[in-house]
Amino acid sequence: MTDQTNDRKIEHIRAIEKDAATDRDGRYFDRIHLTHRALPEVALDQIDTSVEFLGKRLSFPLLISSMTGGDHELIRTINRNLAIAAEQTGVALAVGSQRVMFTQPGARVSFELREYAPTTVLCSNVGAVQLNYGFDIAKCQEAVDCLGADALYLHLNPLQEAVQPEGDTDFSGLTSKIADLVEQLTVPVMFKEVGCGLSSQDIEAGLKLGVKHFDLAGCGGTSWSRIEYHRARNVSDNLGLTFQDWGIPTPLALRLAEPYQQQADFIASGGLRDGIDMIKSVILGASICGMATPFLKPAMESADAVVQVIEQIRREFTTAMFLLGMSDINSVYMNRALILSEGEDRN
Ligand SMILES: Cc1cc2nc3c(=O)[nH]c(=O)nc-3n(C[C@H](O)[C@H](O)[C@H](O)COP(=O)(O)O)c2cc1C
């Protein structure tokens, strides 16, 4: 037996496989040029890329962003491979929406990942709007307990829901429900967009509710609007295409977050594609950097394939630190002197 939430996950993956342009390839970070040091005065093999996140040590500031979960062999394979690779490389992993656990009991096992990732940071995920559709605090806690999570991502996805044929679009009155959740959940609640970015107003709203972690998930990478366009019931329904590039580009979202740096941790995601995008994000104030799509295909293959991608990104990130003359992350974080100019696109 299967249900709509479960089928949807597979349809999303197939849409991404079929249409490369669901990754919008905005390359917004290319406009930022860094201060190359010809005399870096650091030893490449002594650079310390490690960071603390949610009370645990990561080998470098990478998070595999939320993708999937459900009752399907492909989905179980993806999550298992991601968890093994995250543990092996010392990076964080967030799972996709766990709502499906409650509509399709067979989906639960795809989120039972602690056995594969006993020590690293794992993050649960639930759509905030579901708090208006019968998803209560007890279910959020169950989602966290099932994963053994260090935090819960509450994703905010109004565009995706608006374009989705069966979308849940009543976002009214959510803040008081989120406030109760923040108060009662045993782990921190983190806000996250899914590719349209969080604005200053969203950050302020979250701070008032006690949220201390914000994943900006700006535009420039995966477009949920375009993915949902492929699922539109009516072929003449172009809403998803019209809005495919809607939102706040991730570097701009980082700038908007700047005044709140003392009050919260920011995660940069949405269109980051290599270690250079990561270092630019840290310079702009990100404590952690997330990527989703770059890990999807390797995760369908094997844990080793995911490890290879992570190690490539690590090498890019470390090389960038070397070329900036930086020996640890603290000296990179918010160091605006490392930005030489913000100019034209490469293309
Ligand atoms: C296949 C796939 C499934 C996703 N499912 C979720 C989800 O369930 N919950 C969520 O918060 N974000 C989800 N996302 C969004 C990502 O976590 C991320 O915010 C977005 O893709 C932007 O990052 P990217 O440009 O690196 O892909 C998903 C992304 C992908 C590619």
Image: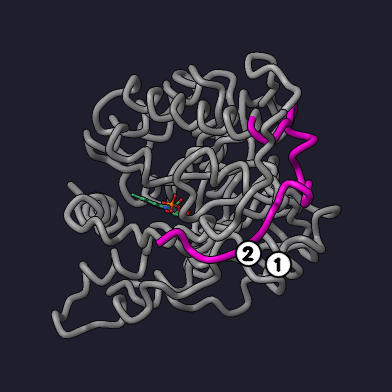
Looking at the figure, which quarter contains the C terminus?
Answer: bottom left
Taking the view exactly as shown, the residue that stands out farthest to the right is 262
Q: Residue at x 32, y 72 (%)?
A: 164
Within the magenta stretch, is there residue 344? yes
Foreground residue among 222 and 72: 222
* x and y percentages locating residue 217 in the rendered image: 54, 57
Within the magenta stretch, is there residue 123? no
The kind of residue on which mark 1 rests is Leu
Q: Which residue is mark 1?
A: 256
* x and y percentages locating residue 9 in the rendered image: 29, 52
**Above or below, comparing residue 283 to residue 308 in the picture:** below
* x and y percentages locating residue 265 in the rendered image: 74, 48
Q: Is residue 147 visible?
A: yes
Taking the view exactly as shown, the residue that stands out farthest to the front is 38
Residue 273 badge: none
The magenta stretch spans which residues? 323-347
Disc 1 Cβ-to-ligand 1 distance below 8 Å: no
Q: Residue at x 72, y 28 (%)?
A: 40
Q: Of helix, strand and loop, which one carries label 2?
A: helix
**Above or below, comparing residue 336 to residue 289 in the picture:** below
Residue 253 badge: 2
The kind of residue on which mark 2 rests is Ala
Q: Is residue 129 visible?
A: no
The image quadrant that residue 136 belongs to is bottom right
Q: Of helix, strand and loop, which one carries label 1?
A: helix
Q: Are marks 2 and 1 in contact (CB under 8 Å)?
A: yes
Q: Residue at x 30, y 82 (%)?
A: 239
* x and y percentages locating residue 49 in the rendered image: 66, 26
